[in-house]
Amino acid sequence: MTGDELDRAIDFLLKSHAGLEARIEQVNQNLGERIEEVNQKLGGRIEETNRQLADLKNLVGEQGQTLTHFIQVATHSFEQHAETISELKESNLRIANAIDMLAAADIAHAAAQSRTDERLDALINTVERYISGRGEERP
């Protein structure tokens, strides 16, 4: 190879190398811009996700408080119902005992009434005999 050819080859290589460096620099710049754009978008999305997570945390906390309050109210209501049921059982037992006492008193009253009827019948018979017997003595 001659000196002229060698100079042209070196010049070609240097120009090619310079072109490649310019393209690499352009690719690096484009890539850097794209990375910055992606970082900005991701940063915005991350901030939005963090905000949504904070909102969700607050909502879950509020629901937990509501559920706790509901459980407390329901438990109190069940306890009151249990007390009421216990009182009703006691009341029903007293009523049943009173009914038993009234039934026994009614039986005793019926027996006394029967004896009173028998004695009244005996008195009526005695009075009728007395009146009938006197009527025979009259002239």
Image: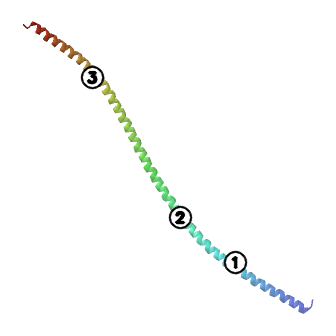
Q: Are marks 3 and 2 in contact (CB under 8 Å)?
A: no
Residue type, label 2: Ala
The correct choice, above or below, for 87 with respect to 10 in the image is above
Q: Position of residue 129 (x, y in %)?
A: 16, 10
Q: Quadrant of residue 136?
A: top left
Q: Is residue 11 left or right of residue 81?
A: right
Q: CA distance from mark 3 to mark 1?
A: 112 Å
Mark 3 element type: helix
Q: Is residue 18 left or right of residue 113?
A: right
User: Front-most of 42 and 10?
Assistant: 42
Compare marks 3 and 1 and give the one earlier in the sequence. Answer: 1
- At 64% from the left and 74% from the top, the residue drawn is 38
User: Front-most of 61 and 93?
Assistant: 93
- At 46% from the left and 55% from the top, the residue drawn is 66
Q: CA distance from mark 3 to mark 2?
A: 81 Å
The residue indicated by pointer 3 is 109
- Give the number of the mark in front: 3 or 2: 3
Mark 1 element type: helix
Neighbour class for label 2 at 10 Å: few (<14), some, many (≥20)?
A: few
Residue type, label 3: His
User: Front-most of 49 and 136?
Assistant: 136
Mark 2 element type: helix
The residue indicated by pointer 2 is 54
The residue indicated by pointer 1 is 31
